[in-house]
Image (cartoon, grey):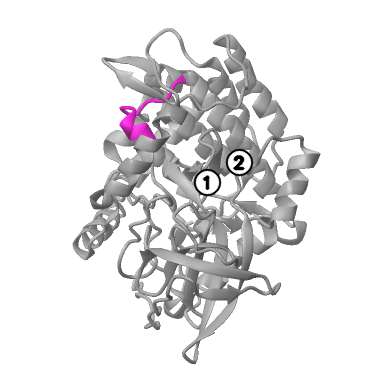
Amino acid sequence: MGVRKGIPEEVTFDLRTERGEGACPPEHSVPGPGTLGWGTVCPLTNLSVRVRPVKMPRVKAAQAGRQGPGKRRLAEHFAAGEIITDMTKKEWKLGSPIGQGGFGCIYLADVNSSKSVGSDAPCVVKVEPSDNGPLFTELKFYQRAAKPEQIQKWIRTHKLKYLGVPKYWGSGLHDKNGKSYRFMIMDRFGSDLQKIYEANARRFSRKTVLQLSLRILDILEYIHEHEYVHGDIKASNLLLSYKNPDQVYLVDYGLAYRYCPEGIHKEYKEDPRRCHDGTIEFTSIDAHNGVAPSRRGDLEILGYCMIQWLSGHLPWEDNLKDPNYVRDSKIRYRENIADFMDKCFPERNKPDEIAKYMETVKLLDYAEKPLYQNLRDTLLQGLRAIGSKDDGKLDLSLVENGGLRTKSITKRKKGIEESTESSVEDMEWSDTQTEEATKTRAAALK
């Protein structure tokens, strides 16, 4: 999940970050979280790039002698209106740039027409010099598992209203001034849930948590069936649809891992060099032990997310700088789910459905295929227990004076977007902050 030593079997990346799965040698080294390169963080607005390394530190495996990236060519600026042609000969028109890093740029984009690309463009395109490498590796996941026809077929056969996996719309090479550039076209998104969660005083209602988790289970079942696990489920990697605030999408496949290539599951093997990979408060016990991620790990991570979203905290968040403490706490609470629930929900009205979910997940073997519908049924029981149902509405709530005051996210959408656009100071990540975050993560390994 974190950057590892040795040649990776496969490295994938996401539009919002360029963290690689697997260990990259110097010539394949990838940037840190939230950047487009080893440089400026994208001040994306509707993409909502959020970098929270202090509050949500990523603990990497021990990396003696780890080196930085090799020198790469800088991206050239493309003017609005530039036409690019993907591998299927489809033409796309670039709009304004909405993010730029050391080696790549992100632009608004739309299918080519006589009209200029406006601020409401449905897509974005990422452009990098073709010899840089990171974008090429990112394409692997999307080309294997995120083509629109694949997603639509799954939606039809599983009778879903939508599936929260970003769609891959195209890619190709583009020549400009004698230089070659690689590009990829993706969906555009709105605000991330971490921003909304914090605006809600770090609480979501029980209904919202269950609704979100049902949709995330849909996503996980899909990517698992396509031989991948995500490995980094968390609120900052969950984005609202750009136009429909009741739809949530799981992004950042930069840590996606092909756990079952050609139908053969990776074997359980503990590797001390990989211990504690992932976002420390959510990462799975397998990851803490240096084991490659699997389906049960994704489900375990989702369980921790549910508990944090509903209770506002996880028991080990008091000492995230000690990964062994975090791991041991998770192991202890896995052995006694009732104590886990008592710790997080001291009041009488405990979410029995989440306890049952955690009990089910802890019984899964490393290579066992989960019964996703059984897990969904468990969460649906929770909705019925509070007099609700799976209506597809994400009723995000504000916490006020200790109580929940429900307010539809639809009514708040404009305000959230304005806040996202204006909060550049929250999204910008200076070299000094990057250095401090690196020191924080390094200290956590001692």
| Residue ID at (66%, 27%) | 376
| Residue ID at (71%, 72%) | 88
Q: Of helix, strand and loop, which mostly describes the magenta segment?
A: loop
Q: Which residue is mark 1?
A: 286
Measured along the vertical axis of the image, is residue 185 above or below residue 310?
A: below
Which segment did they paint magenta? Answer: 196-205
Look at the image and say whether residue 201 sits in the magenta stretch.
yes
Q: Quadrant of residue 172?
A: bottom right
Measured along the vertical axis of the image, is residue 44 above or below residue 134?
A: above
The image shows residue 4 at horizontal and vertical percentages of 46, 65
Q: Amino acid at mark 2?
A: Arg
Of the 4 image quadrants, the one containing the C terminus is bottom left
Q: Which residue is mark 2?
A: 296
Relative depth, front residue between 41 and 99: 99
| Residue ID at (49%, 53%) | 290
Q: How many marks?
A: 2
